[in-house]
Amino acid sequence: MTIDEINALTDADFIGRYGFLFEHSPWIVKDAEKCRPFASIAAFEAAMADIVAEADQHDQIKLLRAHPELASKAAVDKTLTEASNAEQASAGLDRLSQAEYDRFHDLNTRYRSRFGFPFIICVRLTDKAGILAAMEQRLEHTEGQEIAAALAEIGKIVHLRLMDLT
């Protein structure tokens, strides 16, 4: 869609088309909708990024907690959102050996215990080995560093999802 077509969408159609960009968090797109008209796709994306950046920490944590764990039972059962299923499959997370699944499960448990939200990474930009290495490395972050890292990864995910639609 062109930016003119995006700007011309009804509120409901705008939210219906873009509400999935942030995992189980359509409030960001609803807030961005109020910022129309956008001068460009980049301006639309920047408006959403600003909404996330300006949200209080409580809402940012809710956004982080709305994301699924990687290689979880839901990923294996394919009960994630359509976008998450496709993204996790692109990194091979739907085809893990038992040893790989156990390693992901252990790291997910340690990560969630430490930070209180699931590990988030743009899986479309890496592979299983890269994800596991990032999980190990980011377990060393402070809470503030990890919130920032997770939000940055969400930005990458949203960018790719948005580019898929344009």
Image (tube, rainbow, N blue to C red):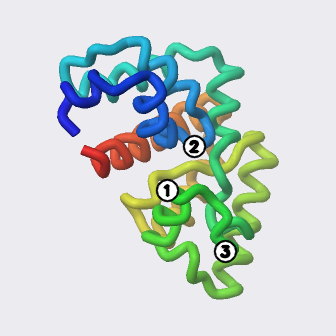
Residue 23 - label? 2
Say what amino acid the circle numbered 1 marks.
Answer: Ala
Say what amino acid the circle numbered 2 marks.
Answer: Glu
Q: Earlier in the sequence, mark 2 or mark 1?
A: 2
Q: Quadrant of the C terminus?
A: top left
Image marks 2 and 1: residues in contact by CB distance under 8 Å: yes
Q: Position of residue 155 (x, y in %)?
A: 42, 37
Question: In front here: 142 or 119?
Answer: 119
The residue tagged with tag 3: helix, strand or loop? Answer: helix
Q: Position of residue 85 (x, y in %)?
A: 54, 64
Q: Earlier in the sequence, mark 3 or mark 1?
A: 3
* Residue position for label 1: 83
Q: Is residue 4 left or right of residue 140?
A: left
27 in relation to 142, above or below: above
Q: Residue at x 49, y 56 (%)?
A: 83
Res. 144 in view: yes
Q: CA distance from mark 3 to mark 1?
A: 14 Å
Residue 15 - label? none
Say what amino acid the circle numbered 3 marks.
Answer: Val
* Residue position for label 3: 76
Question: In front here: 141 or 7?
Answer: 7
